[in-house]
């Protein structure tokens, strides 16, 4: 397996990170995950635009142009012969020796790019059958719009869900639902798609953006606004969404069944429209066996 370290493809076992890299010591960096179908990037520009936007919000300079970055990532995908899978990439602020919370004024740090690509098949069964989630207080910082390497709050919530055999942890600040530990959450109520506004309390998921676009295109009303735990529990349909899980229905919340416990009709339609977008951009998709 080859991975990318700055502008070099190297064997996975030869890849190293300096112990005084600010990403390693402070989580000082940003990342993205881009999906591939049939060896082609899906919503690549949207992901990369978000990467550069996240970097700008923390005054981090990515040491490659968008064109140079795409060329590097395409080489990475080709070298690893990825068909249906993910590219994970991150950029840290770089190495600072000696370690210091304060960034140096007298010389700029050089950002460090790393990336890996691997096969990750579609889970068609999960897209249809869905699964349970739990709810958990959102204790993260207040700039969740930045796709930062600082994910400890997300990790703790995700692992609590895993320990309870749940797919996800739906996060909330008091009564207000925000997003999940590694995905966005949406509800359907009275035929309306309802999801949290794209503000500082959530990451504006690329899949979320595609879902909103296809909903509007196909006449499904969309409401981007806060909703509560009560709204969540009384919804007609609930689903979670992300780059890898696409649109996955929620069957139970904290052990309580959602509606009839099956994927709802609007969720099914939205996933159909979403797959049509994939096919238009990347060709027919493989179904999980």
Image: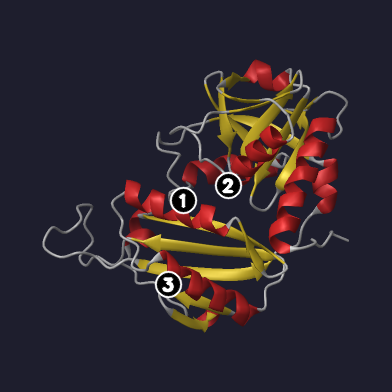
**266 or 236, which is in the foreground?**
266
Position of residue 114 measured from the top left corner of the image (x, y, whole percent): 45, 69
- Dot 3: within a 10 Å radius of its alpha carbon, few (fewer than 14), some, or many (20 or more) residues? few
Tell me the residue that label 1 is attached to: 50
Tell me the residue that label 2 is attached to: 206
The residue at the point 76 percent across, 22 percent down is: 191
Q: Secondary structure at mark 1?
A: helix
Q: Secondary structure at mark 2?
A: helix
- Whether residues under marks 2 and 1 lie with C-beta atoms below 8 angstroms apart, the answer is yes
Q: Secondary structure at mark 3?
A: helix
Query: If you read the primary sequence from the N terminus, does the residue marked by circle 2 or circle 1 appear first?
Result: 1
Q: Quadrant of the N terminus?
A: bottom right
Tell me the residue that label 3 is attached to: 68
Q: Is residue 53 visible?
A: yes
Position of residue 254 measured from the top left corner of the image (x, y, whole percent): 72, 27
Q: Furthest-left residue in view? A: 106
The numbered dot on residue 17 is none
Q: Is residue 257 left or right of residue 82?
A: right
Q: Where on the picture, by quarter, is residue 230?
A: top right
Gap in angstroms between the C-alphas marked 3 and 2: 22 Å
């Amino acid at each position: 397996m080859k991975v990318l370290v700055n502008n070099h493809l190297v064997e996975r076992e030869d890849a190293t990170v300096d112990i005084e890299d600010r990403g390693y010591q402070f989580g000082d960096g940003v990342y993205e995950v881009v999906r591939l179908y049939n060896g082609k990037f899906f919503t690549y520009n949207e992901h990369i635009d978000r990467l550069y936007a996240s970097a700008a919000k923390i005054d981090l300079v990515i040491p490659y142009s968008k064109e140079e970055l795409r060329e590097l990532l395409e080489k990475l995908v080709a070298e690893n012969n990825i068909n249906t899978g993910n590219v994970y990439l991150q950029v840290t602020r770089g190495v600072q020796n000696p370690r210091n919370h304060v960034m140096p004024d007298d010389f700029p740090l050089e950002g460090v790019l790393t990336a890996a690509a691997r096969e990750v098949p579609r889970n068609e069964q999960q897209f249809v059958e869905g699964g349970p989630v739990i709810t958990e207080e959102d204790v993260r910082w207040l700039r969740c719009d930045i796709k930062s390497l600082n994910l400890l709050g997300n990790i703790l919530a995700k692992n609590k869900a895993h320990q309870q055999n749940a797919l996800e942890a739906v996060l909330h600040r008091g009564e207000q639902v925000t997003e999940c530990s590694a995905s966005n959450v949406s509800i359907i109520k009275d035929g309306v798609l309802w999801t949290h506004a794209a503000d500082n309390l959530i990451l504006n998921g690329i899949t979320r953006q595609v879902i909103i676009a296809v909903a509007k295109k196909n006449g499904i009303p969309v409401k981007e606004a806060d909703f509560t735990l009560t709204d969540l529990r009384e919804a007609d349909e609930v689903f979670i969404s992300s780059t890898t899980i696409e649109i996955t229905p929620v069957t139970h919340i904290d052990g309580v069944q959602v509606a009839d416990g099956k994927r709802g009709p609007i969720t099914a339609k939205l996933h159909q429209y979403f797959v049509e977008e994939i096919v238009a951009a990347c060709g027919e998709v493989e179904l999980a066996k």
